[in-house]
Each structure stands twice: as structure tokens, then as C-alpha cells.
Image (tube, rainbow, N blue to C red):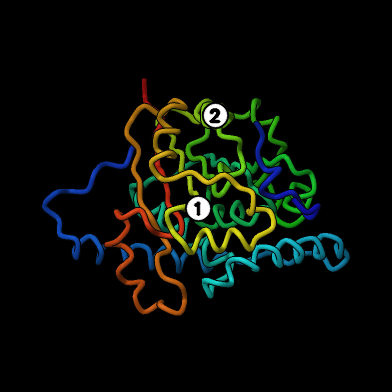
Amino acid sequence: MPDVFDVRAAAVSGRSPSSRPSGQSVAGRATGMIGWCATLRWRLSRTPMPVLPANRTSFIYRERQYEEMLNRGIRLSGENREFFIRGRLASRQARLPRDWRPRRILDYGCGIGTTAHCLTGLFGGAEVVGVDTSEKALAYATERYGSDRVRFRKLEDLATEDDFDLCYVNGVFHHIEPQNRIGVVAGIHRALRKGGRLALFENNPWNPGTRMVMSRIPFDRDAQTLSPREASRLVRAGGFTQRPAEWSLFYFPRQLAILRFAEAALDRFPFGAQYCVLAAKGLM
């Protein structure tokens, strides 16, 4: 892993969504999901990205290095990092009750803090805490996005935090040694309040494009991916006893964007570039 931020390889160390109504057609579900996701993407697009002070050139240089490495892979899709961040958030939010408003959100493996910032735009009154093991990433995130509503802490400090309503985690578990993954899920489970949700996004090894993208990103080349089924079993083994919801996303690259209207109807088929496992902590 290059010494840019150690964003991924060092990011980790060792109402519950109900099933879809059986009487609703695929076309009806797709129409409703497309409209809801479009609204969410618009809301997220209104979240401004803060300007970094001009004298922080070292931070800017490191971010550009990280962006360059990441873009080596994702440029194959024709999209940028922000597209995928906003897509994940809209996809997850569309599967939660529309009136659900979390008070505290945990961004586990927050990296340089971009998603934590977007979460504050989506949930205006929420407090967001990002955790990571990379001091460089945390320093950058604090400098650029830190505020009275957004804090960034070392991973070991998570033991002093709890009562989260939502934990967002993306692309972290494929950097965790398989034998350590249940312990990480158990730690997240402990940090959530009763009824809190875990939204676990991962790169889908069943998608050939995903494997190609990861092979082009230096900090993802040696990752040990996990399938949607493995992730679902993992969260249940880590303490989330209720059956989680699962779906896939990002089926079509920009060159085939005309087909993206169909993605809401395809999400049950586990072949998108990423997938999400959404689990809820039991009330008992």
C-alpha cells in the first residue's frame, strides 16, 4: 500500500427493511425506486464541497495522489468517485423509511472524509463520526470537513463511542483478514443503539468489471473480496440476528447510461459492481 493516506488497507484492523410486497410489479417497484433515487441524488448534489485553505498544499498533494490511484480503476466506468458515493447513499436511503432521521451516524473506515461530509448534507441535523486507522487520512478529513457536526477519530477510540443510529461502511471488509471480520462486525453491532442499522457496501467479486477495476487500483490489488452471500452470513454471525436486506447496484457504465433506468428492477440479481447488506440491531 503506497504511503498516500493508507486509506483502505489501513482503514481497518484486525424500521428493519421489510421484504417487498408480493403484489407489487417489477415495473411498479422500478418506477417508484427511480423517482425516489433521483430526488435523493438531487438533494445530495446540492451539498457543497468546502474549499480547502490555499496554504494546505501538502494535503492537496496527498489527495491528488489518492484520487489518481483510485481513478486508475474507476475511470473504466466513465464516472468519478463522487458519482459512486452519491449513488450508494441514495440507494441506501431509498430502502429506509422516508421519515427516518438518524441522530448519530458512524462512518467506519472514513478515509479522507468525503462520504462523512455527504452524510451531513443528507441528514441535516445528524452528528457524524468518522473512524479510521490512518492518521494522515484523519488529519486531512479534519482539516477539510471537520465541524461541530462532523468529527474524525482513531479506530481505537470507537470503544468510547456508542448509541449510533446508522453505520455506513464501504469497501473496508475486503481489506480485513477473513478471520478478523466477525470481530469487526461485532464491534459495530456494539456501537449501534437498539434498532440501529448497518449499511455494508462491498465490491462484488461476481462482477467481472469490478475485478478489473480493483486490479488497476494499487491499494485494492491484494484485497480478499467477499461475495454478497458471505457478507450476509457475516453480519448475522457478528450479532445481527434478523435477516438482512440485500441488493446490488451500479450495473451499467457511463457508456451504457441509457440503460440505467432498469437498475432498480435488476437490484435483486447479485451482479452489479457493488452490493449492499442492510442489517438492523434487534430491539431485545
Q: Amino acid at mark 2?
A: Ala
Asked if residue 127 shows in the view, the reply is no
Q: Which residue is found at the position 43% from the left and 27% from the top?
A: 237
Which element is circle 1 on?
Answer: strand
Which mark, by number, is residue 111? none
- As rendered, which of 118 and 111 lies closer to the eye? 111
Furthest toward the top, the residue is 284
Residue bearing mark 1: 203
Residue bearing mark 2: 191
Q: Which residue is found at the position 63% from the left and 53% from the top?
A: 220
Relative vertical location of residue 142 with respect to residue 189 in this rendering, above or below: below
Asked if residue 215 shows in the view, the reply is yes
- As rendered, which of 114 and 49 lies closer to the eye? 114
Quadrant of the image containing the C terminus: top left
Which percent across, then down, holds residue 179? 57, 29
Which percent across, then down, holds residue 164? 52, 34
Q: Which residue is found at the position 44% from the left and 39% from the top?
A: 231
Q: Which residue is found at the position 40% from the left and 57% from the top?
A: 91
Contact? badges 1 and 2 (CB < 8 Å): no
208 left or right, relative to 16: right
- As rendered, which of 192 and 226 lies closer to the eye? 226
Relative vertical location of residue 60 with respect to residue 142 in this rendering, above or below: below
